[in-house]
Image (tube, rainbow, N blue to C red):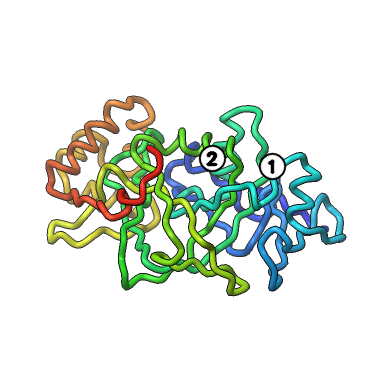
Amino acid sequence: MSDRSLEALGLHDVPALQPLTYPGRPVREPVLLSGRDVLPLRVTGERVGAWPVASGGSLQERALDQVLEDLGDAPTRERYPVIAVGSNASPAQVSYKLQRAGGLSRAVPMVPVKISGIGVGLSAHISRAGYVSASPYASDARDTTLVVSWLDEAQLAAVDATEFPNYGRALLPGDGFPMVLPNGWRLEGAYLYFNTRGLLAHPDGTLRAPAPQPDVLRALLRESAPLRDLLGPDPESWVARAAADPRRCAAGTAVFEEEGWLLRETRFSGYAVAG
């Protein structure tokens, strides 16, 4: 089997360490993240746990659940499907978060899923790493493809710790937000991290759209003298100053509201289960 490492596949950027690469590189096909390797899943007409995965450098295919159990990990039926709208779709970021938590398995199935009712905007806060992250909003007109990861209980708690309190966790029902797997099967529901700080809007009230992080920061700096005074003239100075002093992240977040760019998203909070 060819080299399936994050580095070999060009998926190695970690936004938490390199904030201008946010949101990192998402998976484009169903895979099993296994430490620093990304192993392909072959989609069949069965449940996700039965999809074959080429594992451990061997061409022999085994069912995903069998591979997980052989690793000493929980099978998919004992895991929690979690929708990613930002860097949690990046296997490098997920691997980094789990490694930082210490002693956790870094085996995570990750599958692009077509989901209805969710749009993606920008959070009205500056993360500790210095980037402005992606955030979901409810939109009946939206159909989009987002990565769903199946996390075990310990992995879910570790990711929760990286999201709270800026995000809460909601359980979205599949009948209200249809979620279609690549084989046409539907998920009964999935978890979603929703923003508790609000979303960024333009001065006319329309939501700002995700873009490469340097472009996002450059636009915000261009429109706000207080942000330029606080975080510098360009994206490089923004992330450097934010990393050096977390108080600047909080102050920049306050500027977003002072500029009148803050919009609240409340629909997802009605499905909140944590955070």
Residue indicated by mark 1: 35
Q: Neighbour class for label 1 at 10 Å: few (<14), some, many (≥20)?
A: some
Q: Judge whether 40 appears above or below 12 on screen.
A: below
**What amino acid is found at the position of numbered circle 1 in the picture?**
Gly
Q: Neighbour class for label 2 at 10 Å: few (<14), some, many (≥20)?
A: some
Quadrant where the image shows the N terminus: bottom right
Q: Is residue 254 left or right of residue 116?
A: left
Q: Is residue 187 left or right of residue 242?
A: right
Query: Could you tell me residue 40's position as x and y percent?
Result: 71, 60
**What amino acid is found at the position of numbered circle 2 in the picture?**
Leu
Residue indicated by mark 2: 156
Query: Could you tell me residue 65's position as x and y percent?
Result: 74, 53
Q: Is residue 60 left or right of residue 9?
A: right
Asked if labels 1 and 2 touch by Cβ distance under 8 angstroms, the answer is: no
Q: How many numbered markers are drawn?
A: 2
Image-quadrant location for residue 51: bottom right
Frontmost of labels 2 and 1 is 2
**Element class at badge 1:** loop
The answer to which of 169 and 58 lies nearer the viewer is: 169
Mark toward the start of the polypeptide (2 vs 1): 1
Disc 2 to disc 1, how far (Cα)? 16 Å
Image-quadrant location for residue 43: bottom right
Q: Is residue 150 left or right of residue 135?
A: right
The answer to which of 210 and 111 lies nearer the viewer is: 111
Can residue 36 be spotted in the picture? no
**Element class at badge 2:** helix
